[in-house]
Image (tube, grey):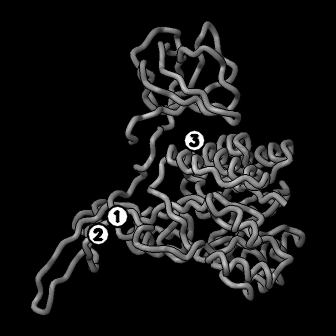
Amino acid sequence: MTPELLMPAGSLEKLKYAFAYGADAVYVGIPLFSLRARENEMDFNDLKEGITIARAQNKKIYVTANIFARNLKLKSFKENFKKWVELKPDAFIMSDPGLMMIAREVDPSVNIHLSVQANCMNWQSVKFWQKQGVTRVILSRELRLEEIKEIRERVPDIELEAFVHGSICIAYSGRCLLSHYMSYRDANQGVCDNSCRYGYNIHKAETEKDQEFYLEDLRNKGEFYQIDEDENGTYIMNAKDLCVIEHLQELRDAGICSFKVEGRTKSLYYASLVAKIYRQAIDDMMLGKKFNPSLLAELNKIPNRGYHKGFVTGNLSHESQEYRHSTSRNYSQRFAGLVLGDSNKNGYVKIEARHRLRPGEELEIISPTGTIKTTVGNILNERGEPVAQAGGGGLTFQLEMAQQPPPYSLVSLIEKGGF
């Protein structure tokens, strides 16, 4: 059986592109009840349309409601869940047992997948959740391959899902406490402030007993936290991104039925390209082909913090941390725009610019079916007037281009030497 490619969809637009680029299923968050509350563009009507799109393409959509709720959210969850369940998504991804009970009260037949937030790490826990009616367990990121194999052997009649790509929190399966401590924004309630990604200064103070070190948050200068320092600098909790594309066959053999990619707050470009690359890797695997190393080079076109293999291979080390930067810098191309519909008129193609483009710059036009390398020629504004450059920010321009790219094409700016 071919494993499912499960992609994030933080908006209706990302959902459409993820499907176009090869996703078998997407997961979307419920505002206020998922761990992406602040950057969640999917409202009820978008969810309804997204489910309709998934049904038309014979694909699946899972709704994420995986917060650990406090008392004040229980009533509103029950009221809203009645509306969501009527849309009949393929499953709800949940972690809070209390919310699961409410879901069952509303609809005893509701399909529930256990969120990675529940930290399910052993076969006995998997059995427990199976008895509670959970049909799929999203396994903890901390598990090694041999541990996954044992879970499958001990509990052969439940679906197992695993993350294969994306950001990792420096916390136990993402159960972050740092954000709440530093800014009173609880990551486990969906309002993470990404404290682990920001820059800090180290200050040394001499005391009567010893030297003491303090961490100063550069967003709130004058606020200090006592810490220990070593030679690696300040980004002490900034993990590289997970990438186990080379180990998909091993994960499939271990019993994983769904390969999950992190990133509901990532760009449409990220959702599309990662889907395309992992789709190719899965298709090659199912044809019995060896892993193609060029797919790793393709992943480096996408903003990332550097890649590592997490706990799957059991070789985690200090190399899994990015100590130099808080933001994504290891990539060779930049998302520059969307091709808008069938718009090739008089040798020009209409684009929605997401980054500045100038004549002479190298581009890669990426589509679900292939790529075309080209160079920026003449540029026209919305009124058809020649301009020196296409500005970013979603403005519409026309680029000189010999042929109309396929639907869902993306414009990618190539930068020699990377960004």
Q: Which one is earlier in the sequence, the residue at label 3 or at label 1?
A: 3
Q: Is residue 372 above or below residue 211?
A: above
Q: CA distance from mark 3 to mark 1?
A: 26 Å
Asked whether residue 418 appears in the rendered view, the answer is: yes
Relative to the observer, which residue lies in front, 58 or 282? 282
SS state under label 3: helix
Q: Which residue is mark 2?
A: 232
Q: Which residue is mark 3?
A: 269
Residue contact at pointers 1 and 2, CB within 8 angstroms: yes
Q: Position of residue 84 (x, y in %)?
A: 78, 58
Q: Residues within 10 Å of mark 1 (few under 14, many from 20)?
A: some
Q: Which residue is mark 1?
A: 323
Q: Nearer the viewer, mark 3 or mark 1?
A: 1
Residue at 23 percent across and 76 percent down: it is: 214
Q: Is residue 264 above or below residue 108?
A: above
Residue type at numbered disc 3: Tyr
Residue type at numbered disc 2: Asn
